[in-house]
Image (cartoon, rainbow, N blue to C red):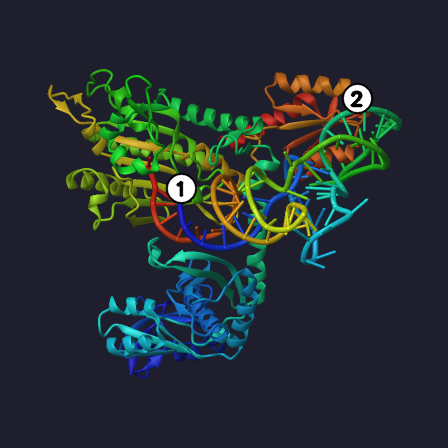
Amino acid sequence: MINITLPDNSVKPFEEGVTGLDIAKSISEGLARNVLAAKVNGQVMDATRSIREDAKVELLTWNNDEGKATMWHSSAHLMAEAIEQLYPGVKFGIGPDIENGFYYDVDFNGYEISSEDLPKIEKKMKELAKEKQTFTRKDVSKKEALDYFSKKGDEYKLELINELEDGEISFYESGTFVDLCRGPHVPDTGHIKAVKLTSIAGAYWRGNENRKQLTRIYGITFPKKKELDEYLELLEEAKKRDHRKLGKELEIFTFSQSVGSGLPLWLPKGAILREKLESYLKELQKQGGYDPVISPHIGNVNLYKTSGHYQKYSEDSFKPISTPIEGEEFFLKPMNCPHHCEIYKAKPHSYKDLPIRYAEFGTVYRYEQSGELHGLTRVRGFTQDDAHIFCRPDQLKEEFIGVMDIIMKIFKALDFKDYVTQISLRDPDRKEDYIGSDENWDKSEQAIKEVADEVDLPNVVVEYGEAAFYGPKMDFMVKDALGRKWQLGTIQVDYNLPERFDLEYTGSDNQAHRPIMIHRAPFGSMERFVAVLLEHTAGKFPLWLAPEQVKILPISEKYHNYGQKVLKFLKNADIRAQIDERSEKTGRKIRDAELEKVPYMLIVGEKEEESNNVSVRKQGEGDLGSYDIESFVTLINDEIKEQLK
RNA sequence: GCCAAUGUAGCUCAGUUGGUCAGAGCAGCUGAUUUGUAAUCAGCCGGUCGGCGGUUCGAAUCCGUCCAUUGGCUCCA
């Protein structure tokens, strides 16, 4: 007998060789029906695998992320089986589970496949799922594994097997499909009740563009049809909120082929929005002791050679431009930091001057690959809400925390309630990708970790290989209203650029010391931030940001004069208002204002004119009743104050 | 940059196998209407069907190429 400890810390004896599924059965039939995998001593494995010694066991179901992942991985196998039956002779790359579903990379070996073929594959998958095929694990020797896939002629699997050690290779068999796989899998395919293959695209074998391009098919599965429907609804909602669609509809931004791809043009309403965001942050920065600075859009290539950007990113920059006579070369600036370093160097600094915080909404230009451009989230010219803090080592933590305060305030003002903090460190195995000494990196990474510990941030994750090339970062990823994650703000600790630019301050010991630099951008970039905001709010911006806050709707021409009077009053109160004087019915004017997502509509007619009132209608909510003009202004101002508190 | 798909009026789209196929709705303009909480009516304007080549008696429709967009891949200071 062995002892199994369950998550509630109860301990139960079982026969040696008991499986997760057996344990589930001992608890309840329902659980046994729903169990997808078992976590044994922290390791996720098949619910059908035997447990041979005392262990902590957690049974994983659909309600658990690891349970979902197991099901999706099994779904990838199911899809492969369906594909193999429909298109004999295809070869398979890899087929993992991903955040929302799974994919499999397939070499269709001559078959022409398009999205029109997906329903056929889906149908086959559903048929096979109904057969409740079990997943059978088999440990195989390297030789057996190689023999099997040599016979099958699948060079991709052979390549994978060759990188594995003998003794750690296993196959999984389900129905007619056998795959090299470490598992785990769900007990049988009957758990897969709803299937949707979502897209098809090319993907290089092993992500290497010099190697063969395989066909990647993405899909997602669910244990209930209803959950698939909900998921599809979510996708629909995401489509409606697509910032490219909303940006056009709400006249926030546009692109012009004549200007160039990836170069956004901000329309008047977008410009107001941006200006509001910028002035809000500028106010926070003023309170935070930042000094505004301004730098030009180009800089001598030598500047970027000093910073290291030239060596690291010349391929990702626009080609240098040069002076016609002297032939001096200039880069469109890809970063603001080198400029700010030069501003720091404009005069000598005492330790008493520090910290110095230079802030600039700096527009930068980067050559993004054409296939990478995407709405406002990936562009070739964008404006960073950049600032660089030059401080002494003893000030680092406090400065870092000050930056985090600003970021938190912004998240709150914009109603991003849910966020994850990612600590991005360098990949210790690829030090050559970064500049600077190990000592500097250790110091920077240590500082970030300490701060994270000290302020007790929720949801901290550590990612290796995600650092900037000059230093580690703390990135803030918000979850939007649909639960999608977006990377926004970033804080970076940098010991390297001060060294490369030979930045100094005179210490109390009268010796030269090296300041530490903090790069930070709470919004990240204005373009990206507005895109995220559009999708998060579905275009219904908070009142303080709305490009148009109030629309006055006169009932008929007779009340235009009164409407104009109201308009004037609102404008004097610094409220962004417009009047709709078209000869349309009120219903029409309301409809149009609702679609434009103007937060407040003021209907004015005979009643209102007589009493010097306005009838207030709130976007998305409806009639709020009658207000006199002054109290309406108070209503607006109170709401804004509340939002920015 | 790579693979695939798409590209018709400002916007959203329809155009069967190449031959009155250049259309609709919305927007815009003009006129009528003077309107009370999500679309008043009528008329008009508007496109060398992404660009350039080619096949054909004839191309929005077929082929090539370039550009752009979309979905992925790779990349992201």
> A9 or A377, which lies in front?
A377
Please report the residue visible at 21 percent of the width from the left and 38 percent of the height from the top: A435
Residue A397 visible in rendering: no
Q: In the visual, does A97 lie left or right of A481?
A: left
Residue A369's disc is: 1
Q: Estimate the x, y position of residue A139 in percent, counting from the top left.
A: 29, 78
Q: Estimate the x, y position of residue B3 in percent, counting from the top left.
A: 45, 54
Q: In the visual, does A514 lie left or right of A231?
A: left
Question: On the rendered image, what quadrant is the N terminus of chain A found in?
Answer: bottom left
Q: Nearer the viewer, mark 2 or mark 1?
A: 1
> A538 or A90, which lies in front?
A90
Residue A474's disc is: none
Q: Is the residue marked by circle 1 packed among few (<14), some (14-19), or many (20+) residues within 10 Å?
A: few
Look at label 1 and name its amino acid: Gln
> A326 or A116, which lies in front?
A326
Task: Give me the chain letter of mark 1.
Answer: A
Which element type, helix, strand or loop, lies under badge 2? helix
Which residue does the numbered mark 2 point to in the structure image? Answer: A559
Which element type, helix, strand or loop, lies under badge 1? loop
Q: In the visual, does A438 lie left or right of A20?
A: left
Q: Estimate the x, y position of residue A282 in percent, counting from the top left.
A: 42, 24
Q: Is residue A641 above or below residue A162?
A: above
Q: Quadrant of residue A542?
A: top right
Look at label 2 and name its amino acid: Tyr
Please report the residue visible at 53 percent of the width from the left and 66 percent of the height from the top: A195
Task: Give me the chain letter of mark 2.
Answer: A
> Do marks 2 and 1 share a subunit?
yes
